[in-house]
Image: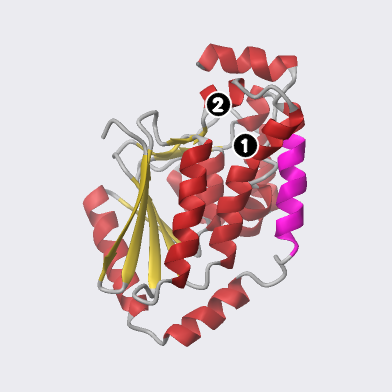
Amino acid sequence: MENAYVTLTIENKVGYIEFFHPNRNSMPSHVLSELEKTITEAGKNEAIQVIVLKSGGDRTFCAGASFNEVIAIENEASGKQFFMGFANVINAMRKCPKLIIGRVQGKTVGGGVGLAAATDYCLATQYASIRLSELSIGIGPFVIEPAVSRKIGVTAMSQMTIDAETFFTPQFAKDKGLYADVFETMETLDNAVKTLAEKLASYNPEALKEMKKVFWKDTEHWDTLLKERAEISGKLVLSEFTKKTLKRFR
């Protein structure tokens, strides 16, 4: 498990999309691009009725943006391009005609919270605490905010954004609606995900497709909105404050 990857495996009409990066499943541009492409392709694949989004390893679901890549950003155009990676993945999840179940096995930060929020139904373990750390490094969760606020409400999103250095518990995430359920072990999580996904895959695919449209009603403007948000992040990431702060984490 040394190299980053995105894979798609199909079992009993369920498409399991797994991403991995050796640095706590952080997301550099090439992983985001591959993830967007894989979600889009799975949405068109007639052998798949339901999608499960998961990550490799057992400690962290997703550490968010790749700090090393963020540090290397030198102008607004490349800054916007980097943050468009998250925008494109969220929009691919939103537009995907198949229901997407999130499987969150461990801690998730920043963009990772956005991915969890963009799933249609999300299950997690007791270790899956969440944090929106962006303000503490000089930017903000601009790109993922629409997905997060849509799922947990503006009040909870604001609380997490302002309390940027705190990990909020999986119970908090469940109470606010990010997680539908929380399990004690990865094994019980995986059993629950498999059972739910295969049950959904046995339902009328046309009904699932129509319900997906209902779930994402009034989000058609997100193509434009997330692009605008990526521009904001792309500018802020060039600030002296952010550059200095990120070097400490390198």
Residue drawn at x 24%, y 56% as measured from the top left: 188
* First to last magenta residue range: 221-233
User: What is the secondary structure assignment of the residue under circle 2?
Assistant: helix
Residue 137 visible in image: yes
Q: Is residue 93 above or below residue 116?
A: below
Q: Is residue 139 above or below residue 209?
A: above
Residue 125 visible in image: no
Number of numbered discs:
2
Q: Could you tell me the amino acid type at mark 2?
A: Glu
Residue drawn at x 68%, y 20% as measured from the top left: 242
Left or right position of 156 against 117:
right
Q: CA distance from mark 2 to mark 1?
A: 8 Å
Q: Which residue is mark 1?
A: 82
**Residue 149: x %, y % from top left:** 66, 53
Left or right position of 73 against 93:
right
Residue drawn at x 38%, y 75% as measured from the top left: 49
Does the magenta run of residues contain 232? yes
Quadrant where the image shows the N terminus = top left
Q: Which residue is mark 2?
A: 69
Badge 1 density bin: few <14, some 14–19, many ≥20, Cα 10 Å: many
Q: Could you tell me the amino acid type at mark 1?
A: Phe
Does the magenta run of residues contain 26? no
User: Residue 114 — which label?
Assistant: none
**Residue 220: x %, y % from top left:** 72, 67
Q: Is residue 176 above or below residue 193?
A: above
Counting residues from the start of the chain, the first of labels 2 and 1 encountered is: 2
Residue furthest left in the image: 187
User: What is the secondary structure assignment of the residue under circle 1?
Assistant: helix
Report the magenta stretch's main SS. helix
Residue drawn at x 76%, y 55% as measured from the top left: 224
The answer to whether the residue labelled 2 contacts the one labelled 1, judged by CB atoms less than 8 Å apart, is yes
